[in-house]
Amino acid sequence: MSEWTWEYNPDDYGDSLTPSVKAEVERICAELAVVNSMVFSEGAAYQGPSPGLRVAHGRTPGGRYVMLSYLTDVRGERIVVVSVSCL
C-alpha cells in the first residue's frame, strides 16, 4: 500500500480556517488518504477514469458542521482539498 498524501489548493487555503475546523479537515483528509490508497491500490499505474469532485463531512468537538470538497488525484496518490464550508 502506498503512502497517499493530501494538500490544500491553493496551498495557503488552510491558513484561513479556525484551529478546530482545520483539525477536523486534517482528520477527514487523513482518513480519505487511507481509504483511497486501498480503493486505488494501483496508485500511479491506475488507468481508469478520474473519480471527480467529491464531498466529505464531519463535526468539530464544538459541534460545528464541516464539509469539504476534494479531488482524488489517483496517479499523484493525493487528496486535493478545493473548498471547506463550516456551519
Image (cartoon, rainbow, N blue to C red):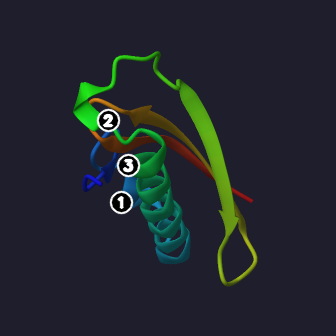
Closer to viewer: mark 2 or mark 3: 2
* Position of residue 19 in the picture relative to residue 68 (left or right): left
Kindly identify the residue that appears in the image at 55 percent across and 28 percent down. 53
**Crowdedness of circle 3 by 10 Å Cα count: few (<14), some, many (20+)?**
some
**Crowdedness of circle 1 by 10 Å Cα count: few (<14), some, many (20+)?**
few
First reached walking from the N terminus: tag 2 or tag 3: 3
Query: Quadrant of residue 75 in the image?
Result: top left
Specify the quadrant that holds the C terminus: bottom right
Secondary structure under tag 1 reads helix
In the image, residue 49 lies at what x, y percent?
47, 15
- In the displayed structure, 62 sits above or below 37; it is below
CB atoms of marks 3 and 1 within 8 Å: yes
Q: Which amino acid type is shown beneath numbered disc 3?
A: Tyr
- In the displayed structure, 20 sits above or below 78; it is below
Q: Name the residue under label 3.
A: 13
Q: Mark 2 points at which residue?
A: 42
Q: Which of 48 and 5 lies nearest the eye of the viewer?
A: 48
Query: Quadrant of residue 30 in the image?
Result: bottom left
Secondary structure under tag 3 reads helix
Q: Mark 1 points at which residue?
A: 15
Mark 2–mark 1 distance (CA, rounded to whole Å): 33 Å
Query: Quadrant of residue 76 in the image?
Result: top left
Secondary structure under tag 2 reads loop
CB atoms of marks 2 and 3 within 8 Å: no
**Crowdedness of circle 2 by 10 Å Cα count: few (<14), some, many (20+)?**
some
Mark 3–mark 1 distance (CA, rounded to whole Å): 5 Å
In the image, residue 59 lies at what x, y percent?
70, 70
* Position of residue 48 in the picture relative to residue 87 (left or right): left
CB atoms of marks 2 and 1 within 8 Å: no
